[in-house]
Structure formats: structure tokens, C-alpha cells
Amino acid sequence: GFHHKYPMTILYDPARKKEPSPQYVTERETCLKYFEKWSEQDQVEFVEHLLSRMCHYQHGHINSYLKPMLQRDFISLLPKKGLDHVAESILSYLDADSLCAAELVCKEWYRVISEGMLWKKLIERKVRTDSLWRGLAERRGWIQYLFKPKPGESHPNHSFYRTLFPKIIQDIEYDDQKIVSGLRDNTIKIWDRNTLQCTKVLTGHTGSVLCLQYDDKVIISGSSDSTVRVWDVGSGEMVNTLIHHCEAVLHLRFNNGMMVTCSKDRSIAVWDMTSQTEITLRRVLVGHRAAVNVVDFDEKYIVSASGDRTIKVWNTSTCEFVRTLNGHKRGIACLQYRDRLVVSGSSDNTIRLWDIECGACLRVLEGHEELVRCIRFDSKRIVSGAYDGKIKVWDLLAALDPRAPASTLCLRTLVEHTGRVFRLQFDEFQIVSSSHDDTILIWDFLNCTPPDGTPQQQQQQLSTRSPTRTYTYVSNKHYEVISLIVNKILPETAGTKEILNYMRLVSSHFRDILTVELPNQILFLFLEELKTFE
């Protein structure tokens, strides 16, 4: 029958073990006495002899007996040998899902992960290698909890990073999908970053939308109609209108249940935000003698800059006036504040660096030929854009060193815009700038050959354009990017007309999209396309 045709390998079953015979018990003792007298090498050789005389199923049994003896939980054993750092180093290669699983293996693994601060290290690795994480870390402020702490400060414990990670993932997911733009036609538009389609139009303002900020729940906008309006991101409904300023609202910032707005009416309003619908005026800060163009704040100070040529510093918790930073010769158009540093740009064509704690001007950067309209800085550099169409990159650390000669401070001047530059964002890998010449430029990723001929001839290549709209010359680089993207997005058969319509869409809408402060990732959809053309 069946069994003869297919002989089975019978594995030794320890449960069916018979009682050992008395003869075996006495002889076993004798054998063990001999065995224990031999050297380790001899013992091994003897066991090899025994094994070679055994049959397959016996080998199977011995194998299953040896397996657990040979397994080593090296993550638990390494620390016992004083090698915690090796165990940490091994686990630090895991991604988030694997790290979650590793925490559940046993108490010892969990201890290695928490004492090794591996969630913090995972976040740091992401920030070092991914520009999206880098941009978010800086914009959301949690970069302060990464890398080396400031002298005299210590970082939070392991569980802080364990809960921060999923929050960042959620942040990236919502931030990646939409672009929110405030437009001159009194509306706010939400765009789907993947399709470039407008998914919602928020109407309610009766004047141009001049500033906005958004997170995953709300969009808050300020307008030339003097109001601040709050919108629900999900439904697009207007949930609150704050009527306080009596002239255009020029800038606003919100964070952690607090908002600061500033206006052409020369005042600054500080608001407490309990929820979308419960926003109450805490204090009005008065002191500027002209329109307040820009505000920024953290838990210590509120900083405001005005057309009256001054920057004023206020205490965040008491709202009391602290000091004035004097030095600019004309009105101030832009400013960024972080840690102790304030960097401001003015219509006196200069950029100034200030120490907020003592009010000293640390450096004046000269080089722009017109009003400095936008400024951003990170830990290494300052990027500024001006109405002369130039973007300059400055060495921040050198600028903070009083001995560094002025001529060494400007690292690069990017001259490509033919109109005023009025918005820029940057991170480790690119600078995204936009200008009144209807162009958006992405520096670093662009390495395309422009179309042949003069601008006029190129303009003719774009022949049949709608006469109802004057079409500004699109810079070579921008033309390249758009046509590459157009060719990729539109079907092969699409003719010049569709491309032109598309280019018109891009230039008219993106100009407006970039009139509001947006994340570094605003042009991720462009960049994703561009990477394939590098």
C-alpha cells in the first residue's frame, strides 16, 4: 500500500518516550564519567563519531534540540556585556513600523529603544535626508527638539518623540495634498496638488485676500475689507468673522491657541483661540506710527515691523511693550524671527540682523538695489528677494561674525526674474521664488536648455493667444519647466492651444497663489515632475 510506496520520515516524538532500561542508566553513567575526563576537542570528535552512526530521524531530533540552544537574543545580551550602543545601533536601522514591532518583543528591547532615544534618531534621520521633513521641522518649530540641545537646555524624554512621529506623518499627509491661495478677486482657492484642479472656492471677503495661514483644521485669512475670517478646511465653510481692524489686515500668524494680526490702521491685535468659533481679543498693541506690515511671534516675544521704519518687540504673555529696534532708514516690508535672531528687509534696500534680547543691530547686509520684499533664514543661510528682480543668498554664520568682511557675506545672486520678487520659500534643496513677471522659479533643480531665438520669437512660437489678456514674457527657464510638465500631463495629441491655456492658468493662478505665505512644499508638484527631467 501507500506507506511502502512513500516511506515517511518519522520525527522523534519526545512525548512517546519509553522509560529508559536499567542497563542503559548504569552504562550511561560510566560513559559520562569517561566523557567528562576528555578535552573539549576530544568531546567534539567523539560526538561527531556518534552522530555519524545515527539515522536521519535521530539527526532531526538532535537538530530540534540544538536550535533553541543556538539562538541568541543579541539585543538583550549585548547590553549585559556593556555593549548597549551596539544594540541601539542595530535597531536604529529600522523604519517606523518595525520599530513599533520591536518595542513589543520584550521589556529589554523596549528599554534599549527608549534609552537609545531611537524615535528621536528616526525623526532626525528623516529630517537630514528628506527636504519635506526638513521644511516641516523648521516651519512647525519641532527642529528645536532635534540634534544637539542648546547649551543649558535638555531635550524631552523618549515618549515625547514616540508621540511626535505619528503627528508629523499626519502633518505631511494633509500638507502634501493641498495648496491654499488668497486671491485679488476676494476669494480663497484650495487646489489639489496632484491634479492642479481647484477643489474649493471660499467666498465671503469683500476685498482682496492679503494674508492667510492654514493648518489641517482651519484657514485664517486677512483682507483689505478689514476683517479676519476663519474657515473650516474640511467643509470650506466660513465659521467666524473677526471685526476689529478699521483698515486692511496686512499680515497674521497663529500657533498654539494664539493669533496675532496687524493692519494698515497701525495697530496689532492679539487673540486667544479656544476653538474655531471662540476667538477673543486679548489686547491691542498700539505704538507704530504707520501701517504694520508684518508680525511674527513665539512663546517669549511678539515682533512687529512697520512703514514707520521701526521694529517693535512685545512680551507675549503680558503683551507689554519691551523695546524698539531702530536703524532702517525707510519702511520695513518683511521680517522673520526665531530664537534670538530677527532678520528684516526694508525699502532702504538693506537687510538687518538684530539680537532681540538686547536690541542691537548685529549686521547690515547691502547689495539689493530696490526694496527688499521677502526674507527667510534657516540655521545656515538667509535668502532675500527684492523688487530689483534679484534673489540673494547670504551666509548667516558669517553675517553674525563681526570680523567677517562685508564682501564675503553674499554667497550667490540669482538674476532671472524680470519683475519684482515678492515671495520666496527655501529649504536644503531648492529656492522657490515668485515674481510680478508671472514666473515661478525653482533654483537648483533647473538645468534645461531654453528654446531658440529671442524672447519675441519665442513669443511668436506661442502664437494664437487670447487677445483679452496681455501675456507677460515667460522666462526661458519657466517656459522650459511648463512645457515639460505640460507635455507630461497633457495627452500626446494636445496642440498648442491647450498648452497655451495651461500656461495662462499657471501664470495667472500661481502668481496669486504665491502672494500668500505658503509652505516650502508649495511647488512639490512641480518638483516631482522636474526630478524626472534632471
Image (cartoon, grey):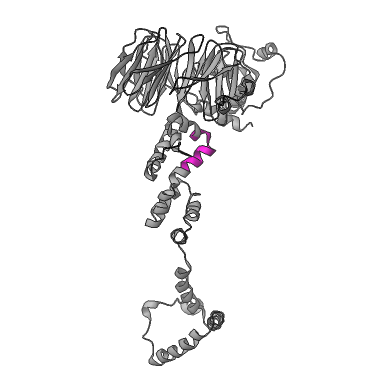
Q: Position of residue 319 (x, y in %)?
A: 33, 19
Quadrant of the rendered image containing residue 303: top left
* 375 on left or right of 267: right
Residues shaded magenta: 122-133
* 423 on left or right of 222: right
| Nearer to the camera, 17 or 243 | 243
Q: Position of residue 2 (x, y in %)?
A: 47, 77
| Nearer to the camera, 494 or 168 | 168
Q: Which residue is drawn at the image coordinates 48% and 12% (left, top)?
A: 332
Q: Position of residue 114 (x, y in %)?
A: 40, 49
Label count reads: 0
Q: Which residue is drawn at the image coordinates 64% and 14% (left, top)?
A: 462
Q: Position of residue 210 (x, y in %)?
A: 43, 14
Residue 134 visible in image: yes
Quadrant of the rendered image containing residue 357: top left
| Nearer to the camera, 344 or 121 | 344
Q: Which residue is drawn at the image coordinates 41% and 93% (left, top)?
A: 23
Q: Is residue 195 above or below residue 7?
A: above
Considering the image in quadrants, where does the C terminus appear?
Answer: top right
Quadrant of the rendered image containing residue 223: top left
* 70 on left or right of 269: right
* 214 on left or right of 367: left
Q: In the rendered structure, does residue 401 fall within the stretch colored magenta?
A: no
Residue 208 visible in image: no
Residue at the far bottom: name it.
23
Majority secondary structure of magenta residues:
helix
